[in-house]
Amino acid sequence: MNATASPILARGRTLLPSKPAEYELHFEASRQALARGWLWLGMLALLGSGLFSVLLVLARTPGVNAWLPGVDFFRTALVVHVDLSVLVWFVAIAGMLWSLNARPRHEAWGWIALGGAGAGTAMMAFAPFLDPGVPVMANYIPVLESRLFLGGLTVFALASVLLVARSLTSTPRLGGALDGAAALHFGLYAAAVSAAVALAAFAWSLAVVPIALDGKAYWEVLFWGGGHALQFTWTLLMLVAWLSLAQACGGRVPLSPRVTLLLFAIALAAVFVTPYAYLAHDVATVEHRVLHTWGMRIGGGLAIFPVVLAVAIALATRQGVAEAARPLRAALLSSMLLFAAGGVIGMTITGSNVKIPAHYHGCIVGVTLALMGMVYHLLPRLGWGRPRGRLAVSQPYVYGLGQLMHIVGLVWSGGYGVQRKVAGAEQVLRSPGEVFGMGLMGMGGAVAILGGLLFLVVVWRALRAGRA
């Protein structure tokens, strides 16, 4: 029996594998250029998101928001902030990983996809100033009802289709011995399959959603199914990042490659609730919405706990960590804490209040921190410098602490019934407790913005060090 694939049984006890798998991704140098381009797009998206988040936090902070133009300003800033920090950033880092994971074929597709994604992002980012339109706070992908913004979103979507198509057709086949690297490469492939399901769901909704629905209802129904499916993509990428970062920190992850591959397959299988939901129920029905929600809650979490447990054991049994790996450990620990906090908050949600954004901010920021850690890990392998120094170690903690304050403030306020997606006078903060909660949210948001800016500084220093 292969010791790396199965635990050893001794005296009736199940022990860790005698030779734990090495969860390290293997990439060829020829794939670096395209991956660098996607990383640049992700960095620019975070920069733009940070600029809008400054305005967003000010718009919801008691006392300060009175000096800002009004509710429409808040909603417009929120639309662009969410789309840049979640949609564009996640797709860009996925593009970086999928480009590294691909065989050297159809490379022109990859460059066309990158160019289209960049053009679409620029159109969406400049729309608030050139053609703002009406902000619509739809779940997953909020929009501005303007030609420039919707045109940019369409271009970005087409570029994403090309990116996913290349990722599916150019991924190396699993061959030879099944090791940790092969399991991680399968995880990246599974994420691409999940993304393809999400894109198909968006197209399906676009074809069948009644255009007679009013603006808010139309966009909400249009993005509901595909938005849920995308969460499986981000979760799979996060799991790949957690295992890679644990390995890079010197941890001995007590999961065999076979078990890891099985967990990735379970996480992927759950996404196929999406086409069933479209076949079983009309897209405008409550049953359709609920099926997506339960598919994500139940299926999406099955693979997470075993990986969390294995990574926690790997870190707990590690005697110290190398200086170069300290930023990676900081990102890994912060990611796991924020994702767990978001999951716990999700179990307490009742009604429509700011507990809902607290839940998804925790989970989304958990994914963001994992991908930040992967950027730190891969920078030297992309030909740039290694993140070093106290700033690189502190950045994930600062960002994570700010976001934790942010979501705790939202949960506190949600207990008082403060509504989501409102600002200024619409918040109707009556009691000192409500004011305190939203104030804590604002302070946490400010700290998180600082942490995001520090990430850009750390990466920029590594880029410059690589040129020297």
Image (tube, helix red, strand yellow):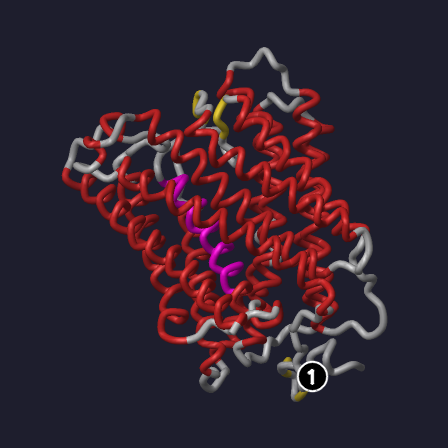
Q: Position of residue 262 (x, y in %)?
A: 72, 62
Q: Secondary structure at mark 1?
A: strand
> With respect to residue 252, does 424 lie above or below?
above
Q: Position of residue 78 (x, y in %)?
A: 40, 35
Q: Amino acid at mark 1?
A: Leu
Magenta residues span 355-373
> What residue lies at 34% left-to-right and 52% top-to-bottom?
449
Query: As drawn, which residue projects farthest toward the left?
Result: 432
Q: Position of residue 86 (x, y in %)?
A: 50, 45
Left or right: where 28 falls relative to 126: right
Q: Nearer the viewer, residue 285 or 81?
A: 81
Q: Is residue 49 magenta?
A: no
Query: As drawn, which residue projects farthest toward the front?
Result: 468
> What residue lies at 56% left-to-right and 76% top-to-bottom?
248
Q: Position of residue 192 (x, y in %)?
A: 70, 50
Can residue 286 be seen in this snapshot? yes
